[in-house]
Amino acid sequence: METDSRKESLADSPGLIESGNLPRHIAIIMDGNGRWAHRKGLSRAEGHREGVKVLKPIVKECSAIGIDVLTVYAFSTENWARPQGEIDALMALLVEFLRSETAELKSQGVRIQTIGNVAGLPAGAQAALAAATQETASQTRMVLNLALNYGGRDELVRAVNRWLDENRPLDQETCLTAHAVASHLDTAGLPDPDLLIRSSGEMRISNFLLWQLAYAEIYVTETLWPDFDPVELHKAIFAYQQRVRRFGGLRE
Ligand code: IPE
Ligand code: IPE
Ligand code: MG
């Protein structure tokens, strides 16, 4: 990691974040676009548009302070239950975001990746994702991991099926191990999230990263996603840094 620019960014912050105790991986459930729009008398699509705008400064800040991986929940396997017009608006915003931001993300050293069943997305979204992941493939400063058509249960089922495909025909001794599950998940190769942030106050994980969140610290803010900003991000990281992580053991 580029420690100098990390220090520079931390110097601009209220001085609360210890650079030695940063979460390596932050996962965010970006929730509340609809409520934000409703309160302003706008359409849900307008709420999503504002929500997408927030992503850029958050990615930039994460990259600047030295976060290794940022995973954002953008569209769940359950979100197909929404009206088609809202789904279309979300997919169009995804394509627009990738087309307009990929070059700048690349210049910040961000590698774009996805988790979720991308093959189930509309062709236009798949093409834009393929272009963005290819264009940023050699970047090493931070991974921006977009969870799209993502569900934790769907991911686990696909992982086990992939493992079965590799191991058929199964002999009596062959067993699935925790390591085999983890290495067949969409997140294979990434560290588990240290910090899960959910905006808009809901106290649930909504099928997000069921396996990987085993020991994540959870931070829920009432702030609606379109109002989330780098100051809110710093508050979440500061809260994380006050936590005692025991992983089932005892406090030292
Ligand atoms: C999160 O905002 C964005 C997606 C789920 C795609 P919501 O659309 O869920 O907003 P609320 O929860 O209705 O306020
Ligand atoms: C979770 O939010 C999914 C995303 C943010 C993409 P939802 O709004 O879909 O979750 P529920 O329905 O409140 O659990
Ligand atoms: Mg919601």
Image (cartoon, rainbow, N blue to C red):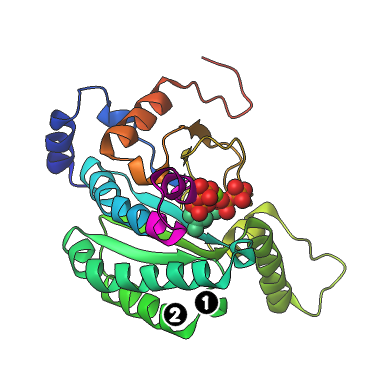
Return the residue found at the far top: 252
Direction from residue 237 to residue 200 in the image, left or right: right
Q: Are marks 1 and 2 in contact (CB under 8 Å)?
A: yes
Q: How far is mark 1 from mark 2, CA to CA?
A: 6 Å
Q: Is residue 208 visible?
A: no
For the residue carrying disc 1, how many other residues have a C-alpha within 10 Å: few (<14), some (14-19), or many (20+)? some
Direction from residue 177 to residue 64 in the image, left or right: left
- Give how far across and how far down residue 123 sits, in percent: 47, 85
- Give how far across and how far down residue 96 sits, in percent: 31, 72
171 and 134: which one is in front? Answer: 134
Mark sitting earlier along the chain (1/2): 1
Residue located 53% across and 37% down the image: 216
Residue located 81% across and 80% down the image: 169
Residue located 15% across and 34% down the image: 7
- Give how far across and how far down residue 27 sits, in percent: 45, 46
Find out if the beta carbon at label 2 lies less than 8 Å from the nearest ligand 1 atom: no
Q: Relative to 114, does residue 178 appear above or below in the rendering?
A: above
- Give how far across and how far down residue 59 sits, in percent: 29, 51
Residue located 16% across and 63% down the image: 107
Q: Secondary structure at mark 2?
A: helix
Mainly helix, strand or loop, the magenta region?
A: helix
Q: Is residue 44 magenta?
A: yes
Tell me, for residue 126, which label it has, or none. 2
Q: Is residue 143 visible?
A: yes
Residue bearing the label numbered 1: 121
Tell me, for residue 100, which label it has, or none. none
Q: Specify the amino acid type for callout 1.
A: Leu
Residue 12: image quadrant is: top left
Q: Specify the amino acid type for callout 2.
A: Gln
Q: Is residue 108 magenta?
A: no
What is the magenta range?
A: 30-48
